[in-house]
Amino acid sequence: MRFSVKGWSKGGARAGVLQVGGCSLETPALLLTTRKGLPAFISPDLLPSLPTPDSRLLQFSPLHFVEGISLKAISEMGGLHQMVGLKEHVFAANPADSIISIPDFQSTNKIGASFETPSGRFLIKPGQYVEMISSMKPNLWVTLADEVPAWVSEKRNRASVERTMRWLDDCLALAKANNTGGAVFGSIVGGSKVNERKYCAQEVSRRNVSGFHISGFGLGESMDERPALLSAVTECLPDDKPRQISGLGLPEEVLQGVAAGIDLFNSTYIYHLTVGGFALTFPSEEIKRRGSIDQLSDTVRDDGTKINLKATIYRKDTSRILEGCKCYTCQNHTKAYINHLFNVHEMLAQILLEIHNTHHYLGFFRKIRNAIKEGTFEEFRQNFVESRREHNAALALCA
């Protein structure tokens, strides 16, 4: 794996290139969430309809394979790439199930980390985890982390840092002894304490890791206190290694992370939007073209970035989700058709919607990268946040 920073924008945002698994990917980039190696609703034959190479960065949890096919069988096939038939994609392993996993802050203990899986709660030790990695052969993998929410005591927070560091050392030693491949991303924790975040980042940066995974965000910290926590971490990290983060998925949160110098984002935002029947429609140029506040309220009261395709107003709407969108869904289907699919509980609704949402969110990241290269990221970020604020204010007046 190789990583290089190609440009900086005012405020700390940076654009780079990540070369891994035969792919050259521009950053900041989005890791697409998968279940057992594939997106929740998009089948392998439809993956090529997404923008490339942006859509080739996939994240999975090894714990999804606790039951079912054996690790030995996966290894004999040649790893996860061969098993799911996506040889040209880049797989990043993260122990936590980003969709259903809520860390159990009580049952996580000294010998391993506890996670919720489709097969129930599972306690995983560093040895077991590295064995999974060795069998699945991902391009990137994140070490175990003891994540804690913002409200825990200082004693519990410090314990989480110590455990995470111990598991990092164990994972590195085991990976070296077993000749485990893949680039290792060391986990950084510390809760909502700047000093603990900084200490953990400094310690992880001293280890022989290929990149950094910033864990434990989205667990109770406020938007206002997050910039200081992010800066405390990134200021301690070298510039020549990529930084990945979990827990920041909303557009404003992504922009907040990019401003702090984050390169890779693991987010379930697309998945939850799709399950809820929402279609992304931002940035807000389309809303502005449509004009009136009355029309805005007709699109179902939301935050200005999405529309609810389950709503009855789309029952006879023969327009595409978003004019100008080049995704497979918008080129071939209407809002009325997707609304109908939801009403009759056809899974095709989620398939078409996830294609659009993934295509659209990857486009959002592309706009971010372009803004960084042009040196206008802070302006881009401010305009986006302001347009959201104005939209919400307009809806408040209609209430």
Image (tube, rainbow, N blue to C red):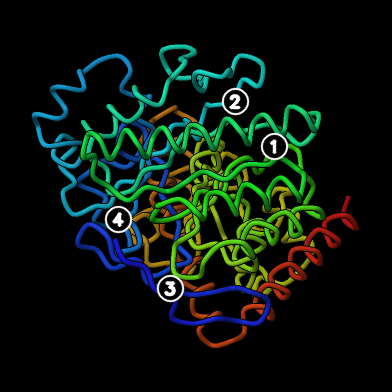
Q: CA distance from mark 3 to mark 2?
A: 32 Å
Q: Are marks 2 and 1 in contact (CB under 8 Å)?
A: yes
Mark 2 vs 4: CB contact within 8 A: no
Identify which amino acid the numbered label 4 is placed on.
Arg
Q: Please rate how many residues cluster around mark 3, counting C-alpha atoms within 10 Å: few if below 14, some from 14 to 19, many from 20.
A: many
Q: Earlier in the sequence, mark 3 or mark 1?
A: 3
Q: Which mark is residue 103?
A: 2
Mark closest to the chain's N terminus, 2 or 1: 2
Q: Secondary structure at mark 1?
A: loop
Mark 2–mark 4 Cα distance, whole angstroms, equals 28 Å
Residue type at the position of mark 3: Gly
Q: How far apart are the alpha carbons under marks 1 and 4?
A: 28 Å
**211 above or below 188?**
below
Q: CA distance from mark 3 to mark 1?
A: 28 Å
Residue position for label 3: 16
Q: Would residue 319 be seen by someone viewing this image from the given angle?
A: no
x and y, in percent, of residue 197 in the image: 68, 48
In this view of the protein, can residue 39 be seen by the observer?
yes
Q: Amino acid at mark 1?
A: Leu
- Disc number for residue 398: none
Mark whose residue sits in front, 3 or 4: 3
Position in image of residue 228 (x %, y %): 76, 58
Neighbour class for label 4 at 10 Å: few (<14), some, many (≥20)?
many
